[in-house]
Amino acid sequence: MQQACFASIDAFAEQNREAILRDITRLVAVPSVEGAPAPGAPFGPGPRAALDKALEIAADLGLATHNAGGYIGWAETGPIADGQKYLATITHCDVVPEGNGWDADPYTVRLRDGWLLGRGVADDKGPAVLTLYALKYLKDAGVPLKYPVRALLGANEETGMLDVDYYAEHFHQPAFCFTPDAEFPVCNGEKGGFNGEIVSPRFEAGAILDFAGGVAHNAVPDRACCVVRADAAALRPGAGLTFTPGGESAVRIDAVGKSGHAAMPEGTVNAIGLIVTCLLDSGVCTPAETAYLKVLAKLHAATDGSALGIASDDGLFTPLTIIGGTIEHKDGRLRQTFDCRYPTSTDAQKLTAAMTAVCGDAARVQNVTSRVPFYIDAGSPAIQTLIETYNEVTGERQTPFTMGGGTYARHFPYAVSFGPEHADLPLPDFAGPMHGANEGANFDKLIEALKIYILALLRLQEVEL
């Protein structure tokens, strides 16, 4: 019986390869960065349009769908009564801004050497389509379900997760949920989050005329530019920097770095940090500007927070990380955002105090938000079901892990993140990471993930929730 089930799932996944590629392409083609709220589009027209497209795909697959006012939507295997226990998956249709450095249109999916390239193929539109096909299998196979299954489709994961807050307020929660928005095998814990801005005093007659960089607070910026009142000959050259005349005895500094996700900054190069270093080495700024830039230099010096005095490791999670995401020059002040992911050995109060001390009189820490670390026992029945399913399909012997990324899982009573990324799968030179240029996803691994998701949803029917 078990072998027959495996064969049925294999056949379904392989028979639908082209249709899955088609539907991922359809969904990626809808730009869905957060925008200004509008009626029926609380997170802007882009996320609403992508949510509509995902629900259109679900309807094409024969699934019942619902749109909850543009906040969130879902497809499901059948009606779910009030209070009835059900399983859920949750993915999201919004994306981070495309940024720079792409080899082609970010919203046109390309297939190269077995890899899909496009904004959202990995985070999280590709996985969203997989969950819809998992429900199609359950529906088409006529499998009796102890727990009906709902594939939730969010529209605000990247910038606030207000979509799941809305869901929790208006609808009853699933008995168990997993989100395909991280790495395999199973992530049962997420670091805390600490975000805010390092804001300068108002500079009077300063040397910095403009400074801009980054596209999102939770992505390492690969582009930044600064216009500074200075003699070009006084600027210290460096890797990734170019200087061009800016008018009125000014010079424009452009920096090119290497982007990546704030939770995984290893190997990235922060373009803002390149300019900060250049300005300090060149000595062209006023004393007040220089004092502020020295604070930013400590932010950009090390992604483990050691230069800020906030490095921390608890042995359960990976060590603390912090990056500077965006910078802007507005009303005579500079505003540098930061994104910190921290383990249980520190907290937002300690981090605020340490960074405030580093700032001294040169800057202020403002607009701080935080979230505490999230952890679920790896031995719980549903998590064991997922890890056993993953190992059986792949032939591996993996165990659950914790991570720095923040997903929808922490917003549900009993939830984890579950693939489809593979940390040990190297990216080819032409592909980039989530939140980076040329975002890539291995197509064969996506198809394998679909098989894992179908089998896991079937196995979860046998768990007492």
Image: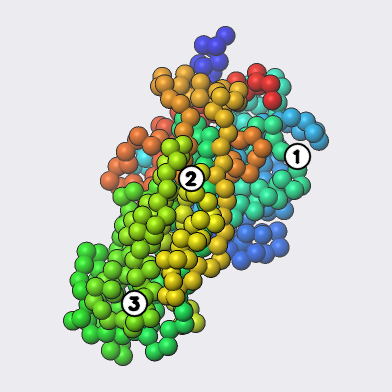
Q: In the rendered image, which residue does mark 3 sit on?
A: 290
x and y percentages locating residue 42 in the rendered image = 67, 59
Crowd tier of the residue under label 1, counting other residues whose Cα lies within 10 Å: few below 14, some 14–19, many 20 or above: some
x and y percentages locating residue 43 in the rendered image = 62, 59
Q: In the rendered image, which residue does mark 2 sit on?
A: 345
Amino acid tagged 1: His
Nearer-N-terminus badge (1/2): 1
Q: Secondary structure at mark 3?
A: helix
Determine if residue 181 is in view: no
Closest to the observer: 450 or 187? 187
Closest to the observer: 23 or 351? 351
Which residue lies at the image location 32% right of the left edge and 60% below the top edge?
301
Nearer-N-terminus badge (1/3): 1
Which residue lies at the image location 44% right of the left edge and 75% below the top edge?
361
Q: Secondary structure at mark 2?
A: loop
Quadrant the N terminus occupies = top right
Q: Secondary structure at mark 1?
A: loop
Q: Is residue 250 left or right of residue 295?
A: left
Amino acid tagged 2: Ser
How far apart in space, not on screen, are marks 1 and 2 (Cα)?
A: 34 Å
Which residue lies at the image location 67% right of the left edge and 52% below the top edge?
71
Number of the front mark, 1 or 2: 2
Q: Is residue 116 left or right of residue 11?
A: left
Closest to the observer: 174 or 27? 174
Vertical side of 224 occupied by 282: above or below: below
Which residue lies at the image location 57% right of the left edge and 48% below the top edge?
372
Amino acid tagged 3: Thr
